[in-house]
Amino acid sequence: MDAIAEGVTASSIHGVYCHELAQIETEGGPVLHMLRIDSPLYTGFGEIYFSTILPGAVKAWKLHRLQTQLFAVPSGLVEVVIHDARENSPSRGAVASFLLGRPHHYRLLRVPPLLWYGFTAKGYVPGILANCADIPHSPDESERLPKDSPRIPYSWNR
Amino acid sequence: MDAIAEGVTASSIHGVYCHELAQIETEGGPVLHMLRIDSPLYTGFGEIYFSTILPGAVKAWKLHRLQTQLFAVPSGLVEVVIHDARENSPSRGAVASFLLGRPHHYRLLRVPPLLWYGFTAKGYVPGILANCADIPHSPDESERLPKDSPRIPYSWNR
């Protein structure tokens, strides 16, 4: 990954960025940052929700035509896999995976529209993926493919 | 509690509201709503962060002069206690407590400025309190008291 702005790294997929997040130790348990309006990855607020992922479960594939997703995982360990099938993208055809979870992978991952993505929970406890998206969820602007779709060059059964 | 708008209930403390949140069963684990810009409790986006609370730990007391807090607990079980010391409040002097957690208490709790609040994690796993606040955190606009402050008529050791 290359640094493109203070604290922000670009990934091998064009337009996908990561930002390490603070975990502030306090008496009683740490405070975990996720997103402020002055974050370099902020593109607007539409909705915040959580996707719970049972250990070993796979949720895939999904694509948003308009919505930008911002992911962080405050509990458990989640692997997010992204596939770029965008025409004219410099990283067209690429697949990349990102581990999100505490304490070693506590980061914000920004996924722009038009990318296929999916995720799975690693380890023995459920993963909680927080998604702060810049427009509210609408079924009209998303598409799905089955997790074993031949259109996506990635196997979840490895 | 009295209903004041569709899905919203007022509490015994003036200006504190609750809204039940959807838990949508999906293959692999439920999707948990928290906040959309069209929620009746939305007052603006400033920051989203998580406070992790170890079992039995108490984080108290805190007051924000400007920030409105919106709490939900996607993991664990958290008790939020609020004390109203506002001059001229119709509920001045009141103390109220709210359980937040899945599956039976999965709700959004709105805490307006100028109220004292604190929280503790019940049960045997850490609680994760998500806080979506309408202005970003700033130490300038908050105050703290020790958890055993005589100024607040509530004992955490009960």
Image (cartoon, coloured by chain):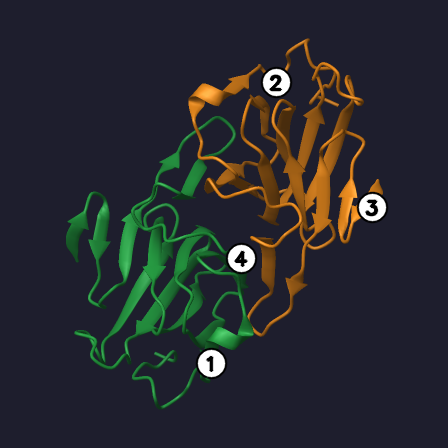
Chain colours: A green, B orange
In the rendered view, tell whether residue A1 sits above or below residue A34: below
Q: Earlier in the sequence, mark 2 or mark 3?
A: 3
Compared across the picture, whether A24 is left or right of B12 comes to: left
Q: Which residue is mark 2?
A: B147
Q: What residue would you read off at disc 3?
A: B3
Which kind of residue does numbered mark 3 sit on? Ala
Q: For marks 2 and 1, give the CA distance.
A: 49 Å
Q: What residue sits 35% from the left and 41% below the top?
A: A38
Q: Mark 3 Cα within 10 Å, few/some/many (few <14, many 20+)?
A: few
Q: Chain of mark 1?
A: A
Q: Residues within 10 Å of mark 2 (few under 14, many from 20)?
A: some
Give the mark nearer the N terminus: 1 vs 4.
Answer: 4
Q: Are marks 2 and 1 on the same chain?
A: no
* Residue B98 in view, yes or no: yes
The three-letter amino acid code for the residue at tag 1 is Arg
Please state the horizontal and vertical placement of residue A79, each as a whole percent of the image.
37, 64
List the residue tagged with mark 1. Answer: A144
Which marked residue is nearer to the observer: mark 3 or mark 4? 3
- Which residue is painted at 32% across and 48% down in the image? A104
A39 vs B141: above or below: below
Q: CA distance from mark 1 to mark 4?
A: 19 Å
Query: Type of residue at label 4?
Result: Phe
